[in-house]
Each structure stands twice: as C-alpha cells, then as structure tokens.
Amino acid sequence: MSQFQSVAPETLSDNFFTRIGKEWSLVTAGTPEHFNTMTASWGGVGVLWNKPVAFTFIRQSRYTLPFVNDSDYYTVSFFGGQYMKELSYCGTHSGRDTDKIEATGFTPVFDKQAPYFAEADLVLICRKLYRQTMNAESFLDTAAIDRWYGDNDWHEVFVGEIVEVLQKV
C-alpha cells in the first residue's frame, strides 16, 4: 500500500494548471459501502475566506454529484499523468452502469473523511464550504453558454476548504 505524508497546503509547489488541466484528477465522495469517483479537468486551488480552498465543478448529470452533495467532505486525487488511460475511463463511464474501481484497478482508501486512491501522488481532502448552481444569468461572457451549456447541463460549483493534503512519500 502506498505511503502518504500530511503536508501543509502552502508548502506545495505543484503547477495546478498542469495538474488539473493536463493531468486531470479524480473527485471522490461517499462511504466505504457506497462511493463514486469522476474525472475532473476543470477546477482550481487558492485562498478564499482566509482558508486554502479547492474549486470543484460537477455537472448536474454526473452520478458523482449526489455523493458530493450528501457528504461533508470530498477528495481531489492527482496521479501525475501516468494513469491517463484509467482517468479517461473514469471520465467516460458512469458509476451508474459500471464498476470503475474494478475496471481501472485503483485501490480506494478510507482512512480519512472521504475516499481517495492509493495510486495517487497528491490528495486534497476538502470540507465543503459553499455550493452554487451555475446559471445563464450569471455569465458575463455569454459565448461560454453556447459552447459548454447548450444542453443546460450546468455545473454545481463547490468551494471546499483543503483540510489536509496528502503527498506520496
């Protein structure tokens, strides 16, 4: 089993433009008995309300959304690019219809407030602080509506306080 150490968020030197946008991540929530994960390639990290936070976007149609909605915590797991095939699978298959964990061979870990994966090299454990549904009225650049939301499958925006960062040793 992989070993992780807890590190302070402000000590990270990762390029999150690469980590999120190019290498992707898995957003995961639930219990050992019932959880789901999905691939995310949009999001961000920063500081809000004097706390380290992650900004997470989940479409209303995604099976993972009720798991995040029903949990106080969720995780964002990064894998460093070597698991792109598995992350692609998790982004193109629904947990409603298939067992993503069996298909990818990932090892879920349940020793924190939300599940994460032993194969990850960096995990953000997030406590939900805020949730809002995107809507057409809030867009200042309406071109994004046609490009990303023509089907009205809006994102739920979550702001999660990063309560712990796990880094692979």
Image (cartoon, rainbow, N blue to C red):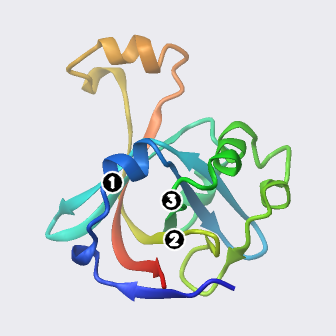
Badge 2 or badge 1: first in the primary sequence? 1
Disc 3 marks which residue?
Answer: 80
**Mark earlier in primary sequence (3, 2):** 3
Q: Quadrant of residue 136?
A: top left
> Residues at badges 1 and 3 in contact (C-beta under 8 Å)?
no
> Which callout, 1 or 3, points at the residue further toward the start of the chain?
1
- Report the side of 168 relative to 115 (left or right): left
Residue at coordinates 62% horizontally, 47% vertically from top-left?
84
Label 2 SS: loop
| Horizontal side of residue 97 vs 14, given as left or right | right
Locate the N terminus and report the quarter of the image it occupies.
bottom right
- Between the residue at mark 3 and the residue at mark 2, the CA separation in whole angstroms equals 7 Å
**Image x and y of residue 143, in percent:** 31, 11
Residue at point 54%, 57% (across, down): 69
Residue 16: mark: 1
Q: Secondary structure at mark 3?
A: loop
Residues at badges 3 and 2 in contact (C-beta under 8 Å)?
yes
Q: Is residue 56 above or below residue 7?
A: above
In the visual, does 1 lie left or right of 52? right
SS state under label 1: helix
Vertical relation: 35 (above or below) 115: above
